[in-house]
Image (cartoon, rainbow, N blue to C red):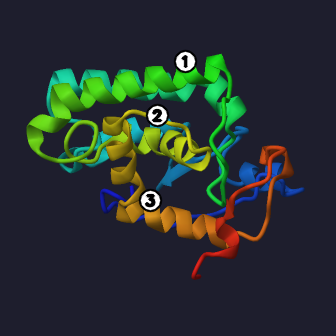
Amino acid sequence: MRALGIPFTERLIRLDAPDFDTQLATVYDGWTVPVLIDGDKVIWESLAIMEYLAERFPALGVWPQQAEARALARSMSAEMHAGFTALRSACPMNLGKRYAARDRGIDCAADVARICRLWRKARETFGQRSGEPYLFGAFSAADAMYAPIVTRLDTYAIEVPADARAYMETILGSAAFSEWREAALLEPWVFEADEINEVAINDLRNTSTH
């Protein structure tokens, strides 16, 4: 929504807050975030929110305009939403740390190879034709879905082919991502369950200029 210029007001609920359930109950009767509130409409789960936004703002290009590109973008986003469990397990998302490169296991490597193939297919089939740097040319929901994957590959110094690294730099250098990262670095709390048992080579929380 930030990248596409859709205005919204954010309400942050800490996942470990003792009254998390109570706070969330004021919004809807589920257990997961994010949740989008638009008037009397309540939409939860990332993909459902993206589909709602695509209908709500059809001119903004939430999904690619071309039908074939849109189908691939949706398939890739669904696979990211439900898959890559080995990468998620071996490399918890952590915007505040940088770790040295090492072998993260064969299953994690298989996930990374699959991700790089998907990115290459999207870029070669659709993205490069437009001359723009995102998966399908202009920024879309698919790029938003893969941003957390980009951060994992970057945080854990996972080696990827040059074309995948170029796409990662596009995401990491985008204004919306930079704002997201800076906001994360300002958060004072740390979830120990998501901290791996390794010494970080760089702690960005201690080097952030904000």
Q: Amino acid at mark 3?
A: Phe
Nearer the observer, 208 or 106: 106
Q: Which residue is drawn at the image coordinates 68% and 22% (left, top)? A: 105
Nearer the observer, 33 or 56: 33
Mark-to-mark CA distance, 3 and 1: 26 Å
Indicate which disc residue 47 carries: 2
Tell which circle, 3 or 1, labels the residue nearer the N-terminal end: 1
Q: Which residue is drawn at the image coordinates 42% and 56% (left, top)? A: 172
Dot in front, 3 or 1? 1
Mark-to-mark CA distance, 1 and 2: 24 Å
**Image coords of residue 63 (percent x, y):** 27, 37
**Image coords of residue 5 (percent x, y):** 31, 62
Q: Which residue is mark 1?
A: 110
Indicate which disc residue 177 carries: 3
Determine which quarter of the picture holds residue 6: bottom left
**Image coords of residue 22 (percent x, y):** 82, 53
Dot in front, 1 or 2? 1
Left or right of 177, for residue 156: right
Quarter of the N terminus within the rendering: bottom left
Secondary structure beneath label 1: helix
Work out whether residue 117 can be spotted.
Answer: yes
Query: Vertical placement of 18 versus 152: above or below?
Result: below
Secondary structure beneath label 3: helix
Tell which circle, 3 or 2, labels the residue nearer the N-terminal end: 2
Quarter of the C terminus within the rendering: bottom right
Q: Which residue is drawn at the image coordinates 65% and 32% (left, top)? A: 88
What is the number of callouts on the image?
3
Nearer the observer, 135 or 56: 135
Query: Vertical placement of 56 versus 18: above or below?
Result: above
